[in-house]
Image: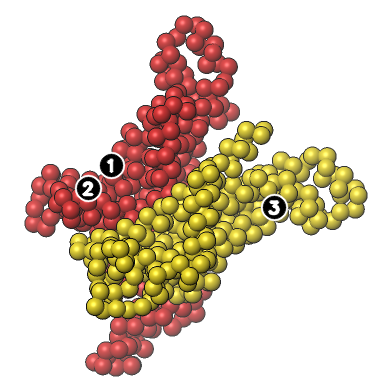
Chain colours: A red, B yellow
Amino acid sequence: MHAAPGGPLAIYLTNPNVRPEDIERLRRALGLDRPLWQQYWSWLAGFLRGDWGYSFSDGRTVASRILERVPATLELVGVSLACAVALAVPVGIWSAVRRGRWFDRAATIASMGGISLPAFWLGLLLQVVFAIGLGWLPSSGRATPGLNDFADHLRHLVMPASVLAVVLASGWSRYLRGSMIDALRQPFVVATQARGVPPARVVLRHVLRNALGPLVAMVTVDAALLVSGAVVTESVFAWPGLGSLFTEALARRDYTVLMALLMLSSAAVILFNIAADVVHAAIDPRVAA
Amino acid sequence: MRLAAVVLACLIAAAAAAPVVAPYAPDRIDLSIRREPPSATHWFGTDELGRDVFARVLYGARVSLAVGLLSAVVAGASGIAIGGVAGYAGGAVDAVLMRATDGFLSVPRLPLLMIAAVVLQPSVPLLIVLIGLAGWMETARVVRAEFGAMRELGFVESARAAGAGHVRVLTHHLLPNAAPAVAVSLTLAVARGILLESALSFFGVGVQPPQASWGNMLYQAQATLATEPWLAIAPGVFIVMTTVAVNVAGDHLASRRSSER
């Protein structure tokens, strides 16, 4: 990382008021003169002890800079996950049940588009239409400054949450459709129907139960990647969460913040993966055995 | 499927023939026609320097398609090597390689690539290698599963008995049988590579201007979204068209494979 042209002290190099010996002193104070592996080792040791160090760009602790961004990200991720599940589950079920009919075809085309769409472009399009063209929604940020109003807050949330929800729901509904079709083929479906269980109940109670496990696992894993910040979406909409913190830190070569964010998101992915296995086993006892 | 193939063929042909097809040079600056909306002479309009957007989209297609295709080659080659060894060897080698794969999968791809791009300030070839190296894990898993399943089958043993070395078994006996599965994961890698390149360039750390790529055209369009929205439309439409076509092709390959079984 330190090979980057620029580096955290670059702003001082071009400043005539800062003497070279001061830069040297700063470099020693920040530990930038030691070999890279020593820097990494002391960083890793500190990180595990809970000492995440100080941000190169403004001297505050990395932990406080990250913590202050967490609520915004959790809010965005929570709302978009909920919307995506609410969208993906009915679409996935209906496509599988009415396989090959017009709804399934339309859903297939829409989800193919959703998977192939770059999130930042969808964001730009929404901004053009709803913020610039129609003027219905604010184009960026989390709230209008100085205004503490729930409706205003909600209006800021609509576009970034829709972008994330569309992208997520596209993948999930395809996945659920696939596992529903597999489950529908199994002999127990005919057996249940033969017992006189109504069709809707067969699908919702029996087939869905078999198909839901893999989806829950997938949702959990995707959620982990989002917790680390939906980098693209947050940046496009200037949503003040972890994702924007990442791009800001990148622009300033703020290594301590970048390293901490990467480490945290990897940890989140691993933890959520374990959680996914546990939840999957709880829904579907066959997995546990 | 047929439509997707036609779209892809047209895109590749147009990108290859960009110097012939493009009505203007992609970097021809004409300050008298800055920021013009789409018209008969400039199909997709002009940008803030009076450059023709259609010409830039065509030249951008060269970069984007090259990055997508070649990064998939890099990803496929490393994935086949790692997954192949893991699946064929089994045991401890398999365990170590697969844990490494899990480890790489746990690091979010785009942020890691963004850091790498900032540090290395990559040229286009280096960008291809970086995006490829960030995408070997999926192919490795697929290849490992295929090879692992075939390892115990009779034909491997008979090939060994006939005097074939391990490398020969891997490349001549196992790989051809895993080809359909590998093809599916490669098409997905192409689409992913195109999306990653456009995202990196969109954040200003990928392909650098004045060279055009679909991503950095969107990056430049973002600043003047309110007054010149057409700058954001054309590159985005082309990204979506390409990735949809590639994904449809991949879907088709996958469903053909599953119906054969």
Residue designated by label 3: B84
Kindly report the distance in space between the C-alpha atoms of the residues bearing marks 1 and 3. 41 Å
Q: Is mark 1 on a helix, strand or loop?
A: helix
* Location of mark 1 (residue): A79
Density class for disc 2 (Cα within 10 Å; few <14, some 14-19, many ≥20) is many
Quadrant of the image containing the N terminus of chain A? bottom left
Q: In this view, does A200 lie above or below B137?
A: above
Subunit of label 3: B
Whether residues under marks 2 and 1 lie with C-beta atoms below 8 angstroms apart, the answer is: yes
Badge 2 sits on which subunit?
A
Q: Position of residue B64 (x, y in %)?
A: 47, 63
Q: Are marks 2 and 1 on the same chain?
A: yes
Instruction: Identify the residue shown where x is 47% and y is 31%.
Output: A177
The residue depicted at 62 percent of the width and 49 percent of the height is B183
**Residue at the spot x=53%, y=55% of the render?**
B9
Q: How far apart are marks 3 and 2 (CA)?
A: 46 Å
Q: Which amino acid does label 2 sit on?
A: Leu
Q: Name the kind of residue labelled 1 in the image.
A: Val
How many labels, in total? 3
Instruction: Tell me the number on the disc at residue A157.
Output: 2
